[in-house]
Amino acid sequence: MATLTFELVTPEKAVLSTTAYMVEIPGSEGDMGVLAGHAPVMTTIRDGEVRVYASAGATPQRISVEGGFAEIGDAGVTVLAERATILN
């Protein structure tokens, strides 16, 4: 199973840094799922929920986010959110 690196950062602090199987992001144009090897892209995010899956079929870790950007690249996914709250 291929994994990717996920980082979530707010202006105040780094909120979460982990490895994941898949990350779902509330993109401004719609939700997007990111797996290892995803094409590089940068997008704005809307208020919503980021879901981080440790493995296929796992219960996701949920994080409420408000505004910001997501960068997907060779190193993984970085979300720069204006505000973030870990829900579980």
Image (cartoon, rainbow, N blue to C red):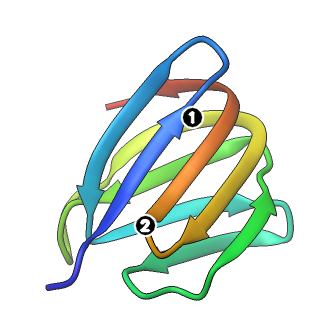
Residue under the image location 75 percent in, 49 percent down? 69
Give the tally of numbered discs. Answer: 2
Residue 22 image point, x, y percent:
36, 71
Please name the amino acid that badge 2 sits on. Answer: Ala
The local secondary structure at tag 1 comes to strand
The reply, left or right, for residue 77 in relation to residue 87 is: right
Label annotation for residue 64:
1
Which sits in the foreground, 74 or 43?
Answer: 74
Residue under the image location 20 percent in, 61 percent down? 54
Which residue bears the numbered disc 2? 75
- Please tell me whether residue 15 is drawn above or below residue 43 in the rendered image: above
Which sits in the foreground, 5 or 33?
Answer: 5
The reply, left or right, for residue 45 in relation to residue 84 is: right
The local secondary structure at tag 2 comes to loop
Label annotation for residue 84:
none
Residue under the image location 62 percent in, 74 percent down? 32
Kindly report the distance in space between the C-alpha atoms of the residues bearing marks 1 and 2.
23 Å
Contact (Cβ within 8 Å) of mark 1 with mark 2: no
Residue under the image location 37 percent in, 34 percent down? 16
- The label nearer to you, 1 versus 2, is 2
Q: Quadrant of the N terminus?
A: bottom left
Please name the amino acid that badge 1 sits on. Answer: Ser
The reply, left or right, for residue 87 in relation to residue 58 is: right
Residue 52 image point, x, y percent:
37, 55
Which sits in the foreground, 78 or 28?
Answer: 78
Q: Quadrant of the C terminus?
A: top left
How packed is label 2: few (under 14 Cα within 10 Å), some, or many (20 or more)? few
Q: Quadrant of residue 71?
A: bottom right
- Please tell me whether residue 50 is drawn above or below residue 64 in the rendered image: below
Q: Of all residues shown, which one is farthest toward the front?
A: 74
